[in-house]
Amino acid sequence: MVYIAPTGRGYYHAALNASIRLTRREMDQPQLADATLGSLQAKGSEAEPSEPIKHGAGAGDFGWRNPGKPVGAVVAAAKVLRILHGSERPLNASEVARAAGLHRGTAYNILRTLQTEGFVGYDEATRSYSVSLHIFELAYGVLRRSGLMDLARPLMHAISDEHSVSVYLSKVLGPSSLLLLDWVGIAFRTDLYVTVGRPSPVPAGASGVIMAAFGSSSEPELEALFSKVAWYQKPSFADFLARVREAKKSGFAVDRGAMFQGITLVSVPVLSPSWELLLILTAAGHSHDLDADALGALSRAMQSATARLSESARLLRLG
């Protein structure tokens, strides 16, 4: 029988407010994680004045005021970058212009400017453009300075080493968007499709159940999203909703080979102080290695780790 944690929000309030003691067997490198948390709290006390947090604001919303008037040129440039990013091949200026709904001359000027600034690469032979790896450099810098990986990586390694699983940390970008930030552990066949910086299909697998359980999508919205994603053995939508209800009670979700053949997934949410779903921590292991007892120990270790991340959510830059 799979371990089921205490139910309801009471579990999370207890986990977030209690002082969580992790033994070396459950969490490797606790000193590093504790030191990082203390450093973040110290920085937070210096940088964060006594202004109260507005209820309903997520970690990405702290400090948000008037967004101001959108700048048309910047909006157009962002659209061009998204189109290039979403394309399976480099595009020429005419193709970008059509996709973005811009005049060709405007698209060309934006592309050339982005090229000059290093955000877009240009192939002289095909006269086509693609997103430059400089974007990755910027993204890595943002992730490094956020403080997230300093705190999360020791916890992820500890879970991976203790339970012989791969551990993935993903950022929730929206109801249908989950972005993998980092992963540690052994490689699976499925890792060919689950790479850092690549969006995951949502709602699918254990992480999809967590997004549905702790996200803000309505049932009709979930059903529309659910119909578009592929599983190895896809459950009915009614069965999926039953898993969602169970995840709300237990605080975690388990998928035994339904998403990927022979792979068991365990996902746990990281919530903001206002209960916004920010991150999802997922462990993956071979199903034959994860019996009920192993799943119980794994889920407890993951819930302890996500509770520590949730405690620090306000101090991390996760916008």
Image (cartoon, rainbow, N blue to C red):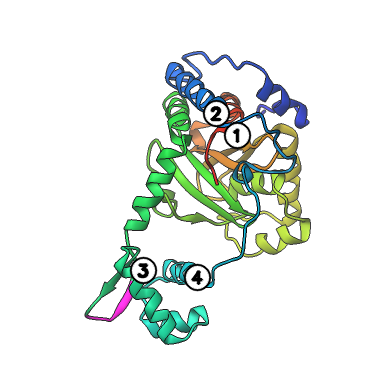
Pointer 1: what residue?
314
The residue under label 3 is which amino acid type? Leu
Q: Position of residue 148 (x, y in %)?
A: 48, 35
**Eyeballing the image, is 219 above or below 12?**
below
The residue under label 2 is which amino acid type? Gly
Q: Kindly check if marks 1 and 2 are in contact, taking CB atoms under 8 A apart as contact.
A: yes
Magenta span has 126? Answer: yes
Task: Kindly indicate the quadrant of the structure image that contains residue 228.
Answer: bottom right
Of label 4 and label 1, which has the lower sequence position?
4
Pointer 4: what residue?
79
Of label 3 and label 2, which has the lower sequence position?
2
Q: CA distance from mark 4 to mark 1?
A: 30 Å
Pointer 3: what residue?
114
Residue visible at 77% across and 31% down in the picture: 8
Q: Tag 4: Cα neighbours inside 10 Å, few (<14), some, or many (≥20)? A: some
Pointer 2: what residue?
44
Of label 3 and label 4, which has the lower sequence position?
4
Of label 1 and label 2, which has the lower sequence position?
2
Q: Kindly check if marks 4 and 1 are in contact, taking CB atoms under 8 A apart as contact.
A: no
Q: Provide the residue span drawn in magenta.
A: 125-129
Q: CA distance from mark 2 to mark 4?
A: 34 Å
